[in-house]
Image (cartoon, helix red, strand yellow):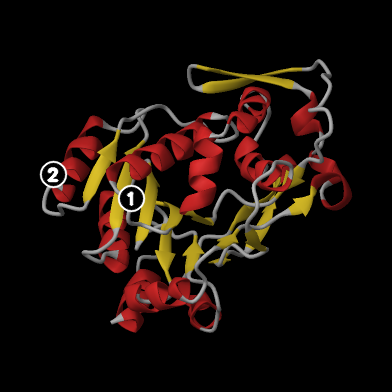
Amino acid sequence: MIAYLILVHRYLGQFTRLFRAIYHHANYYLVHVDRRSAVRLHTEIQDFLSSFPNASLLKSQSVLWGGYSIVDAELRGMEELLRISSKWEFFVNLSGQDFPLKSPTYIEDFLGRNVGNDFIRVADQKKFRPDTISRLQGYCIECSNRILRIPIKRAYLRGVTPQIGNQWMIATRRFCEFVCYSPEVKRFKEFYRHTFIPDEGFFQTVIMNTSYKGTIVNDDKRTIRWVPLGTIKLRPKDFTVKDVDFLLSSQGLFARKFDETVDARVLSILESNLS
């Protein structure tokens, strides 16, 4: 069984298409709607989920890109899913602008052959992304709808090698229990709470620098095309029908990202392929 956490902040129609594409009665679904989103979106998603007994809403909080609030939402989601059921074996986090490339049956079969494996991209941050070390050195505070970056340098966690990857993962229940409840993780939570873009490094750093013993597969099973974006360097490209061949030939289980206002036809093609 799979426990899905879906982070949503816009596009009701796109979210419902995603939900139906990954839905299976044996799985569990938890949806977080950004508190800053329109009240109507909260109501409409709540109404939609009321038809699915294995789906529920996570208490809404504001989520800022680049802030610890993303990590917090994921940790709260893990804890809630652990509370909801003791039966699921894998945790999958998605955004409302992701979409599956494989059917629910295919995904279930794939994970059934990989019980005990954590699928997460991990790399030594100093060696492979030295340009991002500044994210750890400053001090960040989430304030209202923005992040304040205070230009003071602070020491990193003693005895820890910082890691980096992507926000997205397919994690075992065992790892979710560890990252949520182990006393070892407390200092990581305290430190990363005041870093920039911690969602790309917090879970990776925990999994590589603690007593957690798991089998790490350095692949998050996501298909993403990165394109330049100013000082942030890269952002995920919005897929269109021009990318269909690339998507259908991918070995990823999920792809991101899609924007129905840019091209909704690509979603229709993927839906047809899944069916």
Q: Which amino acid does label 2 sit on?
A: Asp
Residue with the mark numbered 2 = 47
Q: Are the residues at dot 2 and dot 1 in contact (C-beta closer than 8 Å)? A: no
**Which residue is more in the foreground, 209 or 266?**
209
Q: Sequence-wise, which precedes: disc 2 or disc 1?
A: 2
| Residue 227, horizontal then vertical, whole percent | 66, 58
Residue occupying image coordinates x 44% and y 60%:
258
The C terminus - image quarter? bottom left
In the rendered structure, the answer to whether residue 76 lies left or right of residue 246 reads: left
In the image, residue 23 sits, relative to residue 241, either above or below, namely above
- What is the quadrant of residue 90 in the picture? bottom left
Residue occupying image coordinates x 35% and y 38%:
80
Q: What residue type is labelled 1?
A: Ser
The residue carrying pointer 1 sits among few (fewer than 14), some (14 to 19) or many (20 or more) residues within 10 Å by Cα, namely few
Q: Which mark is residue 86?
A: 1
Q: Disc 2 to disc 1, how far (Cα)?
A: 26 Å
| Residue 171, horizontal then vertical, whole percent | 52, 55
Residue occupying image coordinates x 66% and y 30%:
188
The residue carrying pointer 2 sits among few (fewer than 14), some (14 to 19) or many (20 or more) residues within 10 Å by Cα, namely few
